[in-house]
Image: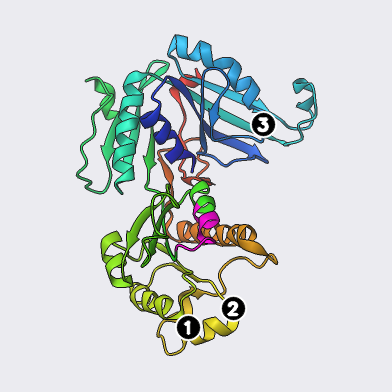
Amino acid sequence: MDGYSILTYAHQVGKPAVLATLVHTEGHSYRKVGASMLLLPGGGKIGSLSPGCLESDLWERVNELLLAGEAELVTYNMKPEEDAIWGEAIGCGGIVRILLEPLDDRSLASLAEAYVAVSAGNEVEMIRFPAGKRFDYEFVPVHGGTQPLRTALPTRDNRRNPLFSTVFKPRPRLFVYGADEGTKPIVRLATSVGFRVAVGDWRSSLCNDRRFPEAELAVGSPMEIATALGLDASDYFLICSHQLRMDREMLEHALPMRPGYIGVMGSQNRIRHLLEGLPGTDIISAPVGVDIGAEGSEEIAVSIAAQLIAARKDRQSRRGVSGIAYRWDLYGSGAEQEDGGTQAFLGACAR
């Protein structure tokens, strides 16, 4: 998820960069309103707003924006009659407006602190206040969070007139029960598509940092693992230890929580034996994964990642939340984008 990747950059690197946010679209667009990316000096980037057709022009603006310290609103018209201006037929067929915000040391330090809070499971709101052609920022916990955040906002009257708000939300957690070899590509892919992953197993020889450096780990019985990780209904569950008794015991702990997603790996015959007599199995996806005719652990991981993405989208659409949410109004679009719900906003820097 681009939002968490942006926070990660601020925490781990913390060098000045330009935050680019898609704030308006007409017609076709590669991303939806609210999507963000970071443009780095020297041509690097984190995230994307297009398949590559806009980034080169955006990069041309980075050094000047960082030097001036002023935000800019850029419009790209890629409708067929305007396409020739670009020197080649891009063919996107739409209009997009992108807000460019240079991030200085102060705002990056606050984003880095937001990373710590979000990684701990808290939501953090980044509020923008107009300050000429710049923004002042305030970072506050959401829903009564207790994680204190420093403010990047000077004391001024514009505190009463917030312009644009971004809410950074924790990544959803996928719990994988079973640390066999086939779990490795699942963990890798799930992490790459925006999940934080926890792996549990009763075998410490398999469930360790060497094999799963990117995952939270717990070793023990299903009950011990559930307690150690604090598993609850907000988690996504994948049961794949390939041990019938252990898988069933974990399901006995997971099903009463009624999580939004439980996937079980195995053949139809194995799954029938595994679920026999268990209540509440209607929420289980089994066999797990999208039916793409997958063969081998890598392809199976792709099919599972695809199903996880679909389940996450469904959960977000039902709850109206996701990884980044935006408050206040921009062109009245009220559109939704891949990182979260949006309710538009109009930047003062459009003067």
Residue furthest to the bottom in view is 277
Q: Please say whether residue 182 is one of the residues in the magenta stretch.
A: yes
Is 35 situated left or right of 50 in this image? Answer: left
Spatial separation of the CA atoms under disc 3 and disc 2: 42 Å
Is 103 situated left or right of 266 in this image? Answer: left
Q: Give x and y (percent) for residue 113.
A: 29, 33
Q: Give x and y (percent) for residue 93.
A: 73, 36
Q: Amino acid at mark 2?
A: Ser
Q: Amino acid at mark 1?
A: Leu
Residues at discs 3 and 2 in contact (Cβ within 8 Å): no
Name which residue lies at 52% across and 50% down. Answer: 188
Q: Quadrant of residue 185?
A: bottom right
Q: Nearer the viewer, residue 41 or 197?
A: 197
Q: Secondary structure at mark 2?
A: loop
In the rendered view, tell whether residue 154 sits above or below residue 259: above
* Extent of the magenta region: 179-187
Spatial separation of the CA atoms under disc 1 and disc 2: 10 Å
Disc on res. 274 = 1
Q: Is residue 226 visible?
A: yes
Q: Secondary structure at mark 3?
A: loop
Name which residue lies at 23% across and 29% down. Answer: 150
Q: Which residue is mark 3?
A: 52
Circle nearer the N terminus (1, 2): 2
Disc on res. 267 = 2
In the rendered view, tell whether residue 330 sits above or below residue 282: above
Circle nearer the N terminus (1, 3): 3
Residues at discs 1 and 2 in contact (Cβ within 8 Å): no
Q: Amino acid at mark 3?
A: Gly
Q: Is residue 162 visible?
A: no
Q: Quadrant of residue 14?
A: top left
